[in-house]
Image (spheres, helix red, strand yellow):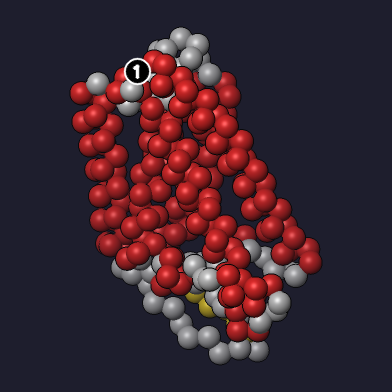
Amino acid sequence: MKRQLVVWDVPTRLFHWLLVALFVMMWFSGSSGGEWLRLHIWSGEAVAVLLLFRLIWGVAGSQSARFSQFIKGPQAVRRYLAGDAELVAQPGHNPLGGWMVVLMLLVLLFQAGTGLFSSDVDSYLYNGPLAARIGDTWSETVTGVHKLNFDLLLLLVTLHVSAIAAYRVFKKQNLLLPMLTGRQTVEGEVAPLSFAPLRLALAGVLLSAGLVVALVLGLGSAG
């Protein structure tokens, strides 16, 4: 019997959609260059805050957001692909989707990290906040890596969107709606998930923002 189950909490959904908005903003501002690079840097710092929060939330947050809930071994992935009923019915990320989340987070972290040390190779007016710490030569090298990694990120985003479309067309599963409403259609008896309090999410955001500000202002001003 199918029923609606609350799966995604507000912090996880906000993280997802804010990340989407910032990704589009960074793509546009980075491609436009010039004065837009100021917005590109601010957006990158905001992404760094979001990613740090997601790491915290993946350990101490709601059940469906915890890495321990959806990071499974190769055997679980094979069972899921073979149609294992228990894994197919699992609320939240399936074993294959869980590894895509991990890969996306790692690539995004690398993108945000290299962005901090990248430079505006055209005018050097809007360098990353930590570019001065490594000098012009190394900063230009990091900038090249930053641009190449973005191509990888675009590929992963394309795969992610394609997978959502494929699930919709071939499996008749809407993976987008639950990330909007928080509710997912499940089959059989599934125990309700546990959710962390919003005050814990707020604390995680403040801690993440504080770490990024301390890094940028501390190391940046020292450079």
On the rendered structure, is 54 left or right of 72?
A: left
Residue drawn at (57%, 32%) of the image: 148
Residue drawn at (38%, 69%) of the image: 62
**Could you tell me residue 138's position as x and y percent?**
41, 21
Q: Is residue 167 above or below residue 34?
A: below
Question: In front here: 11 or 72?
Answer: 72
Quarter of the rendering containing residue 60: bottom left
**Could you tell me residue 222's position as x and y percent?**
20, 23
Which quarter of the rendering shows the N terminus?
bottom right
Q: Secondary structure at mark 1?
A: helix
Q: Amino acid at mark 1?
A: Gly
Residue lying at the far top in this picture: please name it.
123
Residue drawn at (33%, 23%) of the image: 134
Q: Is residue 123 above or below residue 92?
A: above
Where is mark 1, residue-wise? 135
**Could you tell me residue 84's position as x and y percent?**
66, 82
Q: Is residue 2 above or below residue 154?
A: below
- Crowd class of label 1 (few under 14; some 14 to 19; many from 20; radius 10 Å): few
Residue 38 visible at all: no
Residue drawn at (25%, 21%) of the image: 223
